[in-house]
Image (cartoon, rainbow, N blue to C red):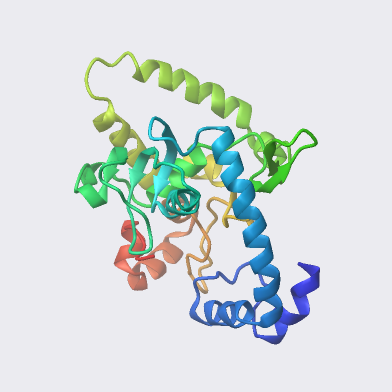
């Protein structure tokens, strides 16, 4: 990062962590940065090396085999699509993909013969009534890990390829109460498996009640969870926090309903009066 700080600033990229990459000005500045010869040259070699390591890692673990089922929380399919694209070019097969929820975008990836989703799949017009608002945020927080994110791959001294973890523990989550949460989650999962009927209606009802209509106490407890608000793990934020009554803007608050539950009545009213209905409803983003 230090090597490119001056160049980032020169082309107009804001280094403020609250300025999101999907803002028009920030996105345009990032494109200017990526088009510079210096960045293209460095990125080209890094991409080539990383692709080779990824292909070898996928081969080691049979990730790209027609008999394999890759299980993931889901969403757009872009990451799975990238894996398939790179590995098919190297001569590997296409695996099955088993998502919790799937809502592909125009730039996403969808193969109806290989992609299945448990709760809902907007591409197949299946289970849309079981999707809760801002589903990716709630499921990803339910799946919090006890280690840092994968930041790359490396070859070991014996020639194997292994992932590089940003950290070998997840101290913020542990301090928040990860062990208590996991024991509660496992107990709940055990109880759900005893239900003789399809548990998905119950799962949707409980998730919708908790995520979309939280009490102030629930919002206070779950809202302080330290959420990685970007894929690189560089912007950890509380999942929810009260809106500012002077300028009620969602910003990077992943849990909107939790933030509203923590806010004053005047701040809630001010926000809801001018908020985008799609944002309030938590519909899938266009991209």
Quadrant for residue 210, please give it. Answer: top left
Quadrant for residue 279, please give it. Answer: bottom left
Q: In the image shown, does 88 or 200 lie closer to the viewer?
A: 88
Residue that sits furthest to the left in the current view: 125
Tell me if I can see residue 225 in this picture.
Answer: no
> Residue 2: x and y, percent?
80, 69
Q: Is residue 118 above or below residue 257?
A: above
Residue that sits furthest to the front in the current view: 91
Q: Is residue 2 above or below residue 157?
A: below
> Residue 266: x and y, percent?
43, 65
Q: In the image shown, does 186 or 72 lie closer to the viewer?
A: 72
Q: Going 30% across and 48% down the picture, which residue do you hit?
A: 111
* Quarter of the image with the C terminus in it: bottom left
Q: How many discs appear?
A: 0
Q: Is residue 36 left or right of residue 101?
A: right
Q: Going 68% across and 39% down the picture, which residue do you hit?
A: 161
> Residue 31: x and y, percent?
56, 79
* Quarter of the image with the N terminus in it: bottom right
Q: In the image shown, does 225 or 41 lie closer to the viewer?
A: 41
Tell me if I can see residue 138 in this picture.
Answer: yes
Q: Is residue 108 left or right of residue 60?
A: left
Q: Going 41% across and 68% down the picture, which residue do you hit?
A: 271
Q: Is residue 263 above or below residue 162?
A: below
Q: Is residue 35 left or right of residue 38?
A: left
């Amino acid at each position: 990062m230090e090597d490119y700080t001056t160049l980032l600033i020169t082309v107009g990229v804001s280094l403020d962590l609250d300025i999101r990459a999907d803002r028009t000005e920030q996105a345009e500045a990032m494109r200017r940065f990526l088009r510079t010869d210096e960045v293209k040259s460095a990125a080209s070699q890094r991409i080539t090396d990383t692709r080779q390591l990824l292909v070898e890692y996928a081969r080691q673990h049979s990730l790209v085999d027609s008999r394999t089922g890759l299980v993931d929380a889901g969403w757009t399919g872009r990451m799975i699509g990238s894996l398939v694209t790179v590995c098919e070019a190297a001569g590997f097969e296409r695996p099955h993909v088993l998502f919790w929820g799937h809502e592909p975008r125009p730039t996403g990836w969808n193969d109806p013969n290989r992609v299945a989703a448990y709760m809902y799949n907007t591409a197949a017009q299946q289970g849309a009534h079981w999707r809760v608002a801002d589903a990716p945020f709630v499921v990803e927080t339910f799946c919090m890990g006890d280690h840092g994110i994968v930041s790359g791959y490396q070859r070991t001294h014996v020639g194997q390829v292994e992932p590089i973890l940003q950290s070998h523990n997840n101290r913020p989550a542990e301090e928040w109460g990860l062990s208590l949460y996991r024991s509660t989650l496992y107990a709940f999962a055990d109880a759900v498996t005893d239900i003789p009927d399809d548990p998905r209606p119950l799962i949707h009802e409980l998730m919708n009640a908790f995520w979309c209509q939280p009490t102030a106490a629930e919002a206070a407890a779950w809202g302080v969870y330290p959420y990685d608000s970007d894929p690189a793990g560089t912007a950890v934020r509380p999942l929810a926090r009260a809106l500012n009554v002077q300028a009620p803007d969602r910003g990077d608050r992943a849990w909107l309903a939790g933030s509203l539950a923590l806010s004053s009545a005047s701040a809630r009213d001010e926000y809801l009066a001018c908020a985008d209905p799609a944002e309030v409803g938590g519909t899938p983003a266009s991209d």
